[in-house]
Each structure stands twice: as structure tokens, then as C-alpha cells.
Amino acid sequence: MLARLSIRDIVLIERLDIEFSRGLAVLTGETGAGKSILLDAFALALGGRGDAGLVRHGAEQGQVTAMFDVPKGHPAARILAENGLDDTSSEQGCEMILRRVQLADGRTRAFINDQAISVQTLKAVGAVLVEIHGQHDERALVDASTHRQLLDAFAGHEKDVAALETLWDIRRTAGTALDEHRAGMERAAREADYLRHASQELKTLAPKDGEETELANRRTTMMQGEKVATDLREAQEAIGGSHSPVSALSAAVRRLERRAANAPALIEPAVKAIDIAINALEEADQHLNAALAATDFDPAELERIEERLFALRAASRKYSTPVDLLAALATQYAGDVALIDAGADQLKKLEAAAAEADQRYAAAAAKLSAARSKAAEKLNKAVNAELAPLKLERAKFMTQVEANAAAPGPEGIDRVEFWVQTNPGTKPGPMMKVASGGELSRFLLALKVVLADRGSAPTLVFDEIDTGVGGAVADAIGSRLARLAGKVQVMAVTHAPQVAARASQHLLISKDALDKGKRVATRVNALAADHRREEIARMLAGAEITAEARAAAERLLRAAS
């Protein structure tokens, strides 16, 4: 419910803080005092359209903050979670603060719990926290797209709808699988001969991932080896052939070693150096032998490599596919051929699964449709019972449930819309189109009384729905608003003393002159018992409050208590 509303610098409101409680709160005041400004400000906090004209003259910005006590599990908390926003949920619920800043240049900023959000998110949260109902309010129950949901809430169909949505998802998944398989079969059948030939050709070729690079590298190595082999053999002949210096160096080392005992200091360093040279020459000879072995290849192998590369690249050009992707293409073609060969059996299985899913959905949708029709009769009876006291005794409310199995959806096959007939013999039609402004307000009130604890926001606002009525009708409206307030929080802007007398909280909106009459400001005062009687007397009598008006106000208050 709404716990507090704070307004800063909005039109005639400089600073205003209002505390709200459960039950019925009425807002009264003379015409032009600022009741509409208050509602415009509240609507702004709920995500309504911004307007630079809302900012008080001389201020850079206006601001409206609405604080709500939200019960645990309320849809508003789910919207916050879906948008990645934090809340303060606990076992008892959470506090949710909606704030809207209106800048003088027309821009607005939106916040929930001091986290910046989009206006769309603020509007979505506001819509589940508050419903505003008036003669011309587009957010009331006149939106036909909400009527099916309201009927289901009245009948307690939520679990049945959730189960039907699951069956719809199963049906859609089965249908998609069938369509994809059938499309694949049709595509494969159109290309059957080509696919069989291509699949066999690629199967025979048997391309491997990375094969082209490996063969090309081997071919390059073999061709380069042929060019350097002559130089390698010449180097080997020089180091290890008939003219190799190794034999001469070895003989020299032996002679020096025999003389080493006579002059070790002179001979040993030379012997060591020659040994190192001999070892290096022998190591070089080994490397040359290995290099020559690497260059030694079978010309037939080079021919085989070149033929394989030619075959792979020819297939690449033929199938317009890189060589490295030929293996994947071969797998795809093999799968397409398998689809042709085995697809008929799979098609039958998928057709059976889709048919079963369709039958299960259709049966559940038909059952729910029948239940909706029965619930519609109960809803009609309950709403029509409320009409006579609201001076709509000749009118009739009816819930149209049109089932169309050819247009299924996740919530069923029904189109639900609230219709009315305002007088016997007239043509019934959609409530928004047939009912006049005053009639529409009373139809909506009757409907909300019936739906109050099912499918309703926790706070309801009624904007002058008693316009143009008085006496018993106004009393009936007050009585129903009070009944509603026993289940949800209700706020009503009213000119009817019969409605005001039934309030548990009475707020008087007035306009005060400031700065010696140079400007005015709107203020709101919570009225105590004596002041309530005086305000209701004013509503009864007009400008001059008489003793009779005060006595009548006292009778209204006693009757309402």
C-alpha cells in the first residue's frame, strides 16, 4: 500500500508530505484547490508522462516520491529482479520507494530505491502497485487485453493457465522439431542424386582436418632438399671423405702425445685444441649425414603428395569449400543422405509427438474455456447485483467469452471482453464504447468491488467517480468504496459528502495565498473529527455553512461509523 507521498515544486505545490494508512482515504476541497495537481503528481511518480509545465514557476526541477509497503511475493518485486534491481524483501515484505524528477527543460529521471531506472520500468512497477480509475482514465479496467486475466483471477484459474502455458511450450517445441525435420527432408529429397554422388565422392577422398597444410609442408621440404643435396655431399666429402683432415690431425696428435713427456707445457695445450677440432669435425659429419638422409626421398612419394594435394584442391573448388572444411562437409552430406534413407521413420515419430502435444493442449484449452464460460456467468451475476444501488438497475453487465480453436495461444483459445447494455432494448457492446463517462465509472466500481481481492493492485485511486450523482447513488458509491477499503487501500477524490463521511482518513486540499497575495500554494491537511464535520457540512451547503448543514453532516458521520 501507499505509505507516504512527498511532492516538491510541482505546479502550485512547494512542499507537501502526506502520510497514508489502510482503509478509505478521501480527498476533498473546493474546485481549483489542487486535487488534480495532486493526482498528476502521483501519476508522475508511477511512470506517467512528464511535462515541463509541471515544474513550479521559478524552480529548476520538481520531484515526487511515493513510498510503498509491498507484501512478500508481490509482482513488483519480480519486475525489479527481472531488471537486475535490488529490493529489501523480507518475510514480511519490503519497502519500495518510487521517485521521479521532472526537470524544467522537459527531461525526467526515474528511480526505485535510489537506483536509476528507465521510465518504462517505473511504469511497469507503478501499474502493479496502483490502479487509477476515473471517467476518462485509460489505465482502468477498460483495457480489453486485461479482461481474460481478470476473469481467470476471479475464478482462481492461475494454476490451470500455468499448466496450459507449459503444454503450449511443449506443443510449440514439438511443432518446431517436426517443421525443421520436414524441411530438411524436403531439401535433401530435392538434391538426393547430387547428395549421394557428393557424399560418396567425399567419402572416397576421405579428407582430414589440417591435411593440406601437412602435405604442402612435406612437399616443400622434399623439393628444397633436392636443391641442397649436392652442397651437403660436397661438404661431407670435405669433412669425412678421402681428403678429410681428420686422419692427418689424428696422426699429429699421436706424435705429439709421444713427445709430451719431454715438454708437457708446450705440447698439452696444442693436443687439447686439436682434439676439440677433431670432435667438432666428427659432429659436423654426423649432422651432414642426417641432412643428407632427410633429403633422400622417393620420387614416387613426391608424386603421390602432389596428386593428393591436387585432388583435395580440386574438391575444394568443386564444392566451393576450403580444403580444411571438406571433412565437415563430408559429414554434413553423409547426414543428409542418412536423413533421406532414415528420415521417413523419424518423420513418423515426430508427427506422432506433435499430434500428441497438440491433442493434450487442445483438450486442456477446451476444458479451461468451458471453465471460463461458467466463471463468466458467476462474474456477471456478482457484478449485476451491484448495479441497482448505483442507479444502473436497468443496465446489464456481461462477460463475452469467444473461443476460437483456430487461434490458440499460451493462455488458451479464448478472447474475453467485458460488455454492457445500458438499457433494455439497446444493443450491448464493449464497456468502453457503450457506457457514458458517469456510467463507466459506476460499472468499474461495481467490477472492482467484485474483483477487489483477486487481480487487484494493493492501492486503488478513484478520481471523482461520483460526479453527477447524489443522494442514494452517492451513498451507494461510498458504501462500496468502504467495502473495497476492507480488502485493499482506497483513495478517492470526491465532491460527495456521502462518500467523504465513510472515510477512515479525510484529507482537505486547499489553496493558500502567500507573500501578501502575490502567489498561491496548495496544501493538504488531515482533518480531525470536528473539522471533518465542518468540511462535510460545506460539501452539503456550499459557501455558507448553516446549522442544518452541520446537523446533516453529523448524521452522515454517525450513519457511516
Image (tube, rainbow, N blue to C red):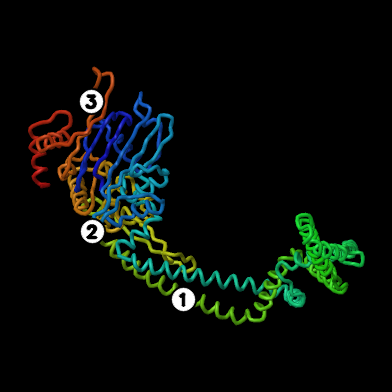
Note whether 228 is above or below 10 in the view shown: below
Q: Residues within 10 Å of mark 1 (few under 14, many from 20)?
A: some
Specify the label residue 359 is tagged with.
1
Q: Of the residues shown, which amino acid type is indicated by label 2? A: Ala
Q: Residues within 10 Å of mark 3 (few under 14, many from 20)?
A: few
Can you say whether 285 is above or below 523 in the image? below
Give x and y (percent) for residue 208: 72, 71
Q: Position of residue 5 (x, y in %)?
A: 27, 39
**Left or right: 152 as drawn, with respect to 506:** right
Tell me where residue 45 appears, x and y as whole percent: 34, 40
Instruction: Give residue 349's quadrant in the image.
Output: bottom right
Residue 429 vs 411, above or below: the answer is above
Q: Quadrant of residue 36?
A: top left
Residue assigned mark 2: 385
Is residue 210 visible in this depiction of the protein?
yes
Residue 91, compared with residue 115, is above or below; it is below
Which residue corresponds to mark 3? 512
- At mark 2, the secondary structure is helix
Residue at 67% x, 74% y is: 336
Count of residue discs: 3
The Cα–Cα distance between marks 3 and 1, rounded to whole angstroms, is: 69 Å
Q: Residue at x 15, y 45 (%)?
A: 502
Q: Amino acid at mark 3?
A: Asp
**Closer to the N terminus: mark 2 or mark 3?**
2
Instruction: Tell whether label 3 touches label 2 (CB within 8 Å).
Output: no
- The kind of residue tagged 1 is Gln
